[in-house]
Amino acid sequence: MYAARVIRLARPWIGAEEQDAVRRVLETGMLVMGARVREFEDRLAERCERRFAVAVSSGTNALELALEALEVEGGEVLCPVLSWPSPAHAILRRRATPVLYDVDERSWNGSADGAQAARSSEVKAAIAIDQFGMPAADEALLGVPVIVDAACSLGATVDGRAAAARGLIACLSFHPRKLLTTGEGGACLTDDEGLAERIRVLRDHGRSGGGFLEPAGNHRMTEMAAAIGLVQLGRLDTIVERRRALAARYRAELADVTFQRPARDGVVGNWQTCGVLVDDPDAVVAAMRADGVEAGRLSFAMNRIGSVRGRFRAGSAGFRIAEQIVDRGMALPLHPLMSDADQTRVIEAFREHAR
Ligand SMILES: Cc1ncc(COP(=O)(O)O)c(C=O)c1O
């Protein structure tokens, strides 16, 4: 049985300001691709130190449009093996082969060495993934176009710059589990004007200059979503600060537990997910939930999931570290509305059940 009040694993911070912003949009009757979407794009670009932002309907669509804009069709695309399925799915949907490689033991992200070792002459692009909001360190090197999957890393920084300032294109998600939410939503960020324009065309039925240039889908963001996003952007710094403080306390009070760590100095995560490794995560999660603390399991190894199994090339000799993170990983509740007293309850429940 759950205790009286459940401490949620994650919870978006949505308040009266978002409700007012949506109501004002509804009153205008202009619900798609208007002033709010344009303003949200401008503010996002500024925040992420990019020239252009193109708002779309999900982080998954952002990845697919980014690959299409880079003209990936067939060939191979590098991708770390530990992830939510969207990057590998996006690659497969471009009829390309994901080249999966193991992650780094410290950062739980792909490493530059891992990506380099996985390369072949067939590689057309690479997706670097900022797992759980910790920027990866594998995006620089490769001599191929790099998409940074920054779905989780809005507000994180690398050497003092926005994580989403990296890569030829960076993709964001605004799903409710992310730092900033619009319900569903996403964005592509780039400094390349041609790519930005191409993504704008691809998100809107292939339309440009009053004509339809090519068959394309509809991946537009609504004005309601952008209005919510604008309010959320105003509180992003507070959200990041609170998440970092909560994560710092977890790490201090659970000093003997393995947490995700930055690959190097200068990389600062936003703690979108606070993962830890334990011996029997199913048992710990179940026991914590019985105490009213909603812990959860961590990510997926792409080599194991049905939609990717048998359709990838192995870019490393096995996936030992990713599989260990999947088999031993669990997420502790962490969201900006959590009180210090809530966190004390989580720490006590974890200490009791993880031993
Ligand atoms: C690393 C990563 N990429 C992409 C996505 C997809 O984002 P969305 O849910 O907005 O489609 C997610 C979502 O969890 C993610 O974690």
Image (cartoon, rainbow, N blue to C red):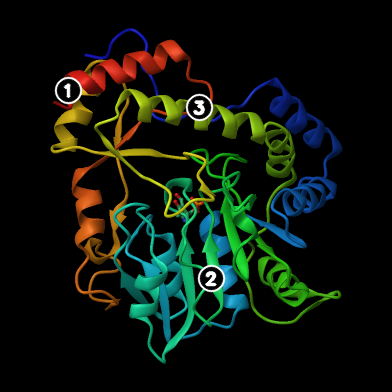
Residue 86 position within the rendered picture, expressed as x and y whole percent measured from the top left: 43, 60
With respect to residue 146, does 222 lie above or below? above
N-term-proximal mark, 1 vs 2? 2
The residue that label 2 is drawn on is 140
Quadrant of the image containing the N terminus: top left
Give x and y (percent) for residue 3: 28, 10
Residue 71 point in image, percent of width and height: 58, 83
Comparing 271 with 264, the one in front is: 264
**Label 2, label 3: how far apart the Cα atoms are:** 29 Å
Which badge, 2 or 3, comes first in the chain's sequence?
A: 2
The residue at the point 18 percent across, 18 percent down is: 352
Q: Amino acid at mark 3?
A: Ala
The amino acid sitting under disc 1 is His
- Foreground tag (1 vs 2): 2
Q: Secondary structure at mark 2?
A: loop
Residue at image mark 3: 245
Q: Is residue 292 visible?
A: no
Residue 294 got which mark? none
Q: Is residue 113 left or right of residue 348?
A: right
61, 70: nearer the viewer: 70
Q: Residue at x 44, y 73 (%)?
A: 91
In depth, the one of 224 and 96 nearer the eye is 96
Q: Is residue 351 left or right of residue 42?
A: left
Q: Is residue 85 above or below residue 69?
A: above
Mark 3 burial class by Cα count in 10 Å: few <14, some 14-19, many 20+: some
CA–CA distance in space, label 1 to label 2: 41 Å
